Amino acid sequence: MSLKSFWHHLSTVDKKRIQQALQMAKEALEKAGAPIEEEALRLASEISEDARFQQFTDRPDQIARAAIVAGVLQEVRENIDIPAERWDVFLQQMRQELPYGLRSGFRRGVNSVAKGLPKKPSTGRNEVLDTPEKRKKACDLVSKYERMGDSKRVAYAKAAKEMNCSARTIQRAWKSRAGQLTKKLKKRSTPPH
């Protein structure tokens, strides 16, 4: 079914909902720093109605490969007037360059979009151990729980719960404490000049 015939069969409510979804997607991408052009938005709308696309929604690797092949075909269409004697050379050159160009170009494109997307909201643990006093308190808690017989892992978890941060944050504070202690000991043992 073409997009026009699909659109014709939709009720007014359905059309409104699709328009709202398109607008929401556009705004969400803009907010995420990955704006989409109107023509790309229309293309996405058309593609989403294609039954072939629908059977690949759980296989994004195939969708990405189809986009690559579409790019190759676009390049071929732009060079369709190449004389017959140079056509085989053109195809051979594309065959040789495609895998290497894809890797760098595709990764660069995906990475630029991914970097601009917002991260998933945190677990709610938002305390940052940004002062020496907070890091000292965290280390003191780890020591306390270790003296009570808990393993390091359990001590990190208990201290994290108490300080409203992650166990990994507590572990980093604990490890940095060891580095700072070593610096202090070296300072004390070095004779003055």
Image (spheres, rainbow, N blue to C red):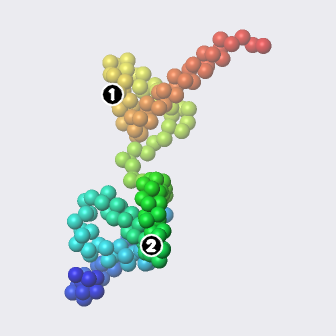
Image vertical order of residue 123 relative to residue 58, above or below: above
Q: Amino acid at mark 1?
A: Val
Dot 2 lies on which element? Answer: helix
Q: Categorize mark 1 by other alpha carbons within 10 Å: few (<14), some (14-19), many (20+).
A: some
> As shown in the figure, which amino acid type bears the numbered disc 2?
Ala
Residue drawn at point x = 65 percent, y = 11 percent: 189
Label tally? 2
Label number found at residue 154: 1
The x and y percentages for residue 137 are 48, 29
**Quadrant location of residue 119?**
bottom left
**Residue farthest to the right?**
193
The answer to whether residue 182 is left or right of residue 160 is right
Q: Give the camera-side residue of 110 and 36.
A: 110
Residue 190, position as x, y percentages in the image: 68, 13
Residue 53: horizontal and vertical position, in percent?
A: 27, 68
- Name the residue: 30% across, 60% down: 62
Rendering quarter of residue 181: top right
Residue 121 position (above or below residue 157): below
Q: Which residue is mark 2?
A: 84
Q: Is residue 13 visible?
A: no
98 or 36: which is nearer to us?
98
Q: Quadrant of the C terminus?
A: top right
Q: Nearer the viewer, residue 175 or 57?
A: 57
